[in-house]
Image: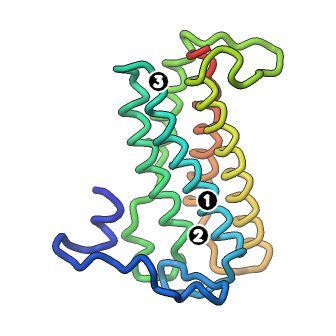
Amino acid sequence: MHLFDFLSGHKGRKQPAVTTKTGDAGFSSLMGGERLPKHDQHFVTLGDLDELSCLIGTARHYLPAGHPFAQESKKIQSLLHHVMAVIASSPDSAVYKDLPHITEQDVIWLESRQAFYSENARISGRFVLPGESNAASAWMDLCRAVCRRGERSASALFTHQHSSNKKNRGNKDINAIRSFLNRLSDYFFVLARSLD
């Protein structure tokens, strides 16, 4: 199920307004309605992951025709939307328990895809110069770098919530998201090396 279908509840529902002017004062809302400053760590993390999803969609068009990343990238973007939905909702909101969550199976799938690309990857002990060989590998390195930033942002959010005794998403969700983002950046690194 696509996240938008889940959130809209049913087809035929009126399309949401793009311009609401509710953010003009520098605040935005989480899915449960909680208003927070736009610089809150929730929105920093969501912005980093949204940027990553945009880059993945762009990178898809720079790979050779028929490359498996074309289909994998759509699944990864969908899983990133699951991560963003969990981050954008409060654990005590009505919608939280029904959201699609990252699972151990999602992490295992990423590991299997990384192993697949590892077979053709040339990984050396030296630092990588992104773009040294071709545009496709450079796009994957850019995805890796933004994924790492998203991982750091998520870690800062989870650490802040834990230290401030705010309602936390639970260790299961936090650990799954951390593992997923960590594996995802590794996946992009190995994919980039397989394209060099």
Q: Which label's residue is closer to the chain start, 1 or 2?
A: 2
Of the two numbered discs 2 and 3 on the same chain, state the one appearing first in sequence: 3
Residue at (58, 82) in percent of width and height = 28
Q: Quadrant of residue 27?
A: bottom right
Residue 84 vertical position relative to residue 130 in the rendered view, above or below: below
Q: How many marks?
A: 3
**142 is higher (above) or lower (below) than 35:** above
- In the rendered view, does 10 fall on the left or right side of 179? left
SS of the residue at dot 3? loop
Residue at x 56% of width, y 16% of height: 195
Residue bearing the label numbered 3? 63
Residue 49's spot in the image, x, y percent?
58, 54
Give the Cα distance between marks 1 and 3.
Answer: 32 Å
N-terminal of the pair, mark 1 or mark 3, is 3
Kind of residue at badge 3: Leu
- Residue that badge 2 annotates: 169
Location of residue 108 in the rendering, given as x and y in whole percent from the top left corner: 49, 35
Instruction: Give whichever of 87, 130 is nearer the camera.
Output: 130
- The structure residue drawn at horizontal position 64% and vertical position 45%, both measured from the top left corner, is 147
User: In front of the other: label 2 or label 3?
Assistant: 3
For disc 2, the neighbor class at 10 Å (few under 14, some 14 to 19, many from 20) is: some
Please state if 192 lies on the left or on the right of 60 as rendered: right
Residue to which mark 1 is pinned: 174
Dot 2 amino acid type: Arg
Question: What separation in Å lies between label 1 and label 2 (alpha carbons)?
Answer: 7 Å
Binning the other alpha carbons within 10 Å of mark 1 as few (below 14), some (14 to 19) or many (20 upward) gives some
Mark 2 in CB contact with mark 3 (< 8 angstroms): no
Is 30 placed left or right of 40 in the picture?
Answer: left
